Image (spheres, grey):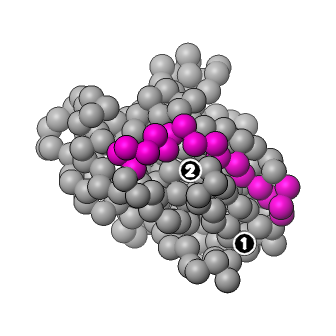
Amino acid sequence: MVSNKGDAVTIADRFLDARRQAGGLDRYPGDLPDTLEQAYRIQDAAIARWDRTVLGWKVGRVGPPYMAQFQTNRLAGPIFSVVEDGDGRILPAMPVFANGFAAGEAEYLLRIGSAPPKGKLDFTLEEAADLIDAVHVGIEIASSPLKTINELGPVAVISDFGNNNGLLVGAPISDWEKRRFEDWPVATLVDGVEVGTGIAAAFPDGAIGSARFLFELMARRGIALTAGQWISSGAITGVHDARPGQTVEAWFGDEHHLACRLIAEGAK
């Protein structure tokens, strides 16, 4: 059990050391947290000690049996690396931990246009949507030095930056408020092979529901969100393992496509 601040800092430092060394972890670096609150304390300690600007937040799905255990269907983690998709002729190179966990996830990326009102703890979907000024297609790079991070469940994922190692931002969706983009079929491919399909509307309250979740969670954690930060809405087609050297592609309906090449993360 993570019983005090010292425990949280120790675990955070072990994760950060592994990230700095681009190493791998065969097991969770300490006692696995019993609660989400304990896991977020580790995340808070890691953010403070990583000393980098938070450019956005990934929102991930929490499925059964953890959904009932923790009474939530989502979790969150910080994003420190954002890459904009180019002209398609050169694939962006996205680093992952070669000796840890790595995956590419097709997601919608919502940009915060206005910071949520200070002290507001609850939002309707309409209020959440009003704080978003753009929606793009994208790929989240889910990667951690901890090989078994997803197998250990939400408390492990939260502990290490939500299992995030970057975000690839694709094209904007024009008139997103009217386009019903959450009903678009989405597909993920690894090395040209389709590995998953889905629609964002299959999520509870869709992509906008992820924004609402984040606004409410951060208000309760006392973390201020700012205009320009990204919200990665959650893996629409599932989580698909991939390794350095492989290509991850995402299709959003017939209109939008982007791809990246995974490379091995280097020591910092």
First along the sequence among labels 1 and 2: 2
Q: Which residues are magenta?
A: 176-193
Q: Please tell me the numbered disc located at residue 99.
A: none
Residue drawn at (72%, 72%), measured in percent from left and top? 261
Question: What quarter of the picture does the C terminus occupy?
Answer: bottom right
At label 2, which amino acid type do we have?
Answer: Glu
Give how far apart the Cα atoms at labels 1 and 2 are: 17 Å
Name the residue tied to disc 2: 107
| 10 Å crowding of disc 1: few (<14), some (14-19), many (20+) | some
Q: Is residue 62 above or below residue 211?
A: above
Give residue 261's mark.
Answer: 1
Q: Position of residue 137 (x, y in %)?
A: 52, 57
- The amino acid type found where label 1 is placed reads Arg
- Where residue 199 appears, x then y in whole percent? 60, 38
In this rendering, position of residue 226 left or right of residue 173: left
Residue nearest the viewer, comparing 193 with 263: 193
Residue 2 visible, this orientation: no
Residue 118 in sight from this viewpoint = yes
Q: Is residue 110 magenta?
A: no
